[in-house]
Amino acid sequence: MIKTILITNDPGIAIDAQEAGISRIMVDLETGPEKIQRQATRTTFISTHVPEDVAKMRKVVTKAELIVRVNPLHSDSEGEIDHAVGNGADLVMQPMITKLIQFEDFLTYLDGRAKPLPLIETSFSMAHISDIAFHPDVSEVYFGLNDLHLSLGLDFLFEPLALGIIDWMGSMVAASGKSFGFGGMAAIGGAGELPPEFILGEHARMGSSCVILSSRFAKDVGLFEPEGRSERLAKAMQAIQTKWDQLQKRSALQVQDDTRATFSKIRELSERIRRNGSL
């Protein structure tokens, strides 16, 4: 089964999520002004998490792994990483790599105390994917499609998928013997311009090991409504498991047809954005 990441700083949500089978909880500390400026024209999630959330979540995250995404490398990154690790992070995610020295300094600060999770979301880190993936301290990388498509001057979040960019990066990571994940996904059968079934199918086709559950997923399952939440989450995760099992049984021709339909839908949505400025 593919690993799932849920971004939250709410202990109640985290408890229900791990009981439902969500495998990773993320505290997102990438809250600097650079991210707000980069994504100012988008409706994407901007975190309001604070450093104190790491220890708070570590107390309740007992069955899932705890990921902490820190800010891009800056003058106090060593202290920020020390705080994340000291308060129980299992993995520390590094965003916005624009120089290899940033990646190397990040690993130095981490010093093997938690697993590094480099986030490939810039044209630079994409071009240097092999340097990052083949590093002996790295066992997994993640492709951040939102900032990546902006960095490449594209119009739609999933456009790198339809252009073959994710296939290429996935093959580079696979050649290193490491695992990778990408993108965000809503609940199966839920709303959204690009059906989550299409996205999950591409994860299965490429051998991806991990996906972030998107803000659309949170809306689909009523994540912020405590009454009945554990049951809704369990049902949503069972739907993902069922669909994943079905995807593993596809014939080569079915995989080809599904990928063609997915890419066609992405191109249609990209063109709509170019014409109208948004979906």
Image: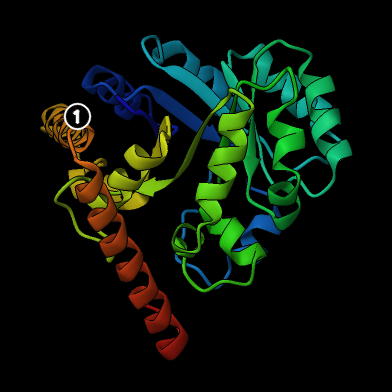
Please, is residue 275 above or below residue 3 in the view? below
Q: Amino acid at mark 1?
A: Gln
Badge 1 local density, few (<14 within 10 Å), some, or many (20+)? Answer: some
* Residue at the image position 11 percent from the left and 28 percent from the top: 231
Q: Position of residue 105 (x, y in %)?
A: 86, 29
* Residue at the image position 79 percent from the left and 29 percent from the top: 106
As helix, strand or loop, the secondary structure at mark 1 comes to: helix
Tell me if 149 is positioned left or right of 273 in this view: right
Of the 4 image quadrants, the one containing the N terminus is: top left
Q: Position of residue 104 (x, y in %)?
A: 84, 30
Please, is residue 140 above or below residue 161 in the view? above
* Residue at the image position 49 percent from the left and 15 percent from the top: 58
The quarter holding residue 100 reads top right
Q: Position of residue 205 (x, y in %)?
A: 35, 41
Check disc 1 and report the residue beneath it: 241
Farthest residue toward the bottom?
275
Tell me if 146 is positioned left or right of 123 in this view: left
Q: Position of residue 110 (x, y in %)?
A: 76, 19
Of the 4 image quadrants, the one containing the C terminus is: bottom left
The quarter holding residue 80 reads top right
How many dots with numbers? 1
Is any atom of residue 219 visible in this view? no
Is any atom of residue 56 visible in this view? yes
Q: How is the image coloured?
A: rainbow
Tell me if 137 is positioned left or right of 233 in this view: right
* Residue at the image position 73 percent from the left and 51 percent from the top: 127
Please, is residue 171 above or below residue 111 in the view? below
